[in-house]
Amino acid sequence: MNMPTYIEQRNELMAKLLCGFYVLELIINVLVEGLDMLFPPVGLVFCLVLILLVYKRIAPNITMYIIITSLYGYLFYLITDYPYLVNFMFVYIGLVLSSIYQSYKAIMYAGVLTVGLTFYSFFSFHNEIFPNVSTSDLVYLVMFAAFITIFFLFYIRFITSIVDRSNETQQKLQYTLDSANIVTWSYEIDTGFLKLSNSNGTFSFLERDYKSDTIFLHSLLHEDDVSEVAFLEERLRNGFSQTHEFRFELDAKTIWVECHGYPVKYEGSITHVEGVLIDITRRKELEAHMTYMAYHDHLTGLPNRMMLKTWYPQVIKKCKNKFAVMFIDFDNFKNINDTYGHDIGDKVLKEVTNQLKEALRATDMLSRIGGDEFTAVIANVDIDKALDVANRILEELQNGVMIEGHHIEVTASIGVCYPERELELEKLLQYADEAMYNAKQEGKNQISIWNEKDILNKNIS
């Protein structure tokens, strides 16, 4: 909070206190002295002037000194018109009220006015206010005023140091939270108000304060996470600490958050829930990337052997052995690497991957299991349709590929395994590999079929 705003708030507080002080003092004087104390309405005029200055927010610093001066001016009026000890005692209240500003200058100014008003009261109304008090005792009144002034000066210094340290700690904490994309939140069970520590950066789409029947705005959640977040909120309301991950779905992006919630009880009842939201989008992206890399070939982007193993049980369940496994190995690929280099060889593999995809259906799974070796699982086919697919692959490869001005011919030998009973994936790959090897032995650029009875060689080109 900047200083002018702080002083404006203190001016408002002082205006309220002084008006309340005037009303209270007026009531006491009326009860003691009668209705004559209502006139002249000097205090009322002071209050109206202060209210005008404060709520118009006219020069906050100058207004502060005007308020303090007005206070002592009114006390001067009281002492002058009604020189009683009780009115003189109010002089020290001026110092107490001035300490509200937490300002050295305000306290010093009020201290000077207090000492001055003490001298004025002592010499002008000595008999009325200080009967039987010798002149030498004035020093004690001045010392008392000086002591209160010094006390408040040290008090302000002490409070200021505490506030400064608190602000510094809070600022460091906020920097830490902002740099880590963390916000703290507090939800009041009875009122439904949610307050966030900060809504900048990643969480700028959230308002810092809003009222809702739910802890988190369900309209901002990913549709797949709404039910889980509703369960999370129910557990929090029932007094169970929770940690959960969910997504905010925005127009341009998805934000993953890790939410920690801690119910707070008062006299046995849950009054509010405290928690933190941590942006874990980057972590989720890295996890997804690592998972992708673990299950996909880095060169072609195709599923690898691990993904094939994971996907295979689903094929068994859905197709009930009506599927074929193909083992595809490119002929003489080593010559391409030796002739054009491995960089060109890698680009050839990428290009023929696209050709293989063109020959397969969207429901088929093409994977690279190493080097120039590929497999294809063809779902829901009989042996004849599986052969049609293998033929389409050979036809796609007939035109070769064009890489950096080089026309490179590519052929493949394909082994097809069509199981008639449930077999492990590794066995199917082994049999398809044997059939592929047989195709190479028979002259390459061919298809060889394996079945339960025998290995049948078929030249289909």
Image (tube, grey):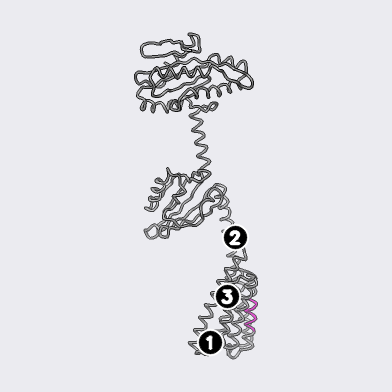
Q: Is 117 in the magenta? A: yes
Residue at the (36%, 27%) spot, across then down: 318
Q: Position of residue 36 (x, y in %)?
A: 52, 90
Secondary structure of the residue carrying numbered label 3: helix
Examine the rendered structure and indicate whether residue 269 appears above or below residue 135: above
Give the magenta-colored segment's residue range.
110-119
Q: Give the quadrant of residue 224.
A: top left
Q: Nearer the viewer, residue 413 or 73?
A: 413
User: Is residue 151 visible in the rendered structure shown here?
Assistant: no
Q: Which of marks 1 and 3 is in front?
A: 3
Task: Label 1: state its secondary structure.
Answer: helix
Counting residues from the N terminus, which is met first, the one under dot 2 or under dot 1? 1
Going by the numbered disc 1, the residue's amino acid type is: Leu
User: Real-space Cα distance between discs 2 and 3?
Assistant: 31 Å
Q: Is tag 1's residue or tag 3's residue first in the polypeptide sequence?
A: 1
Dot 1 corresponds to which residue?
A: 38
Q: Dot 1, how many residues are within 10 Å of its Cα: few (below 14), some (14-19), or many (20+)?
A: some
Q: Distance between the residues labelled 1 and 3?
A: 20 Å
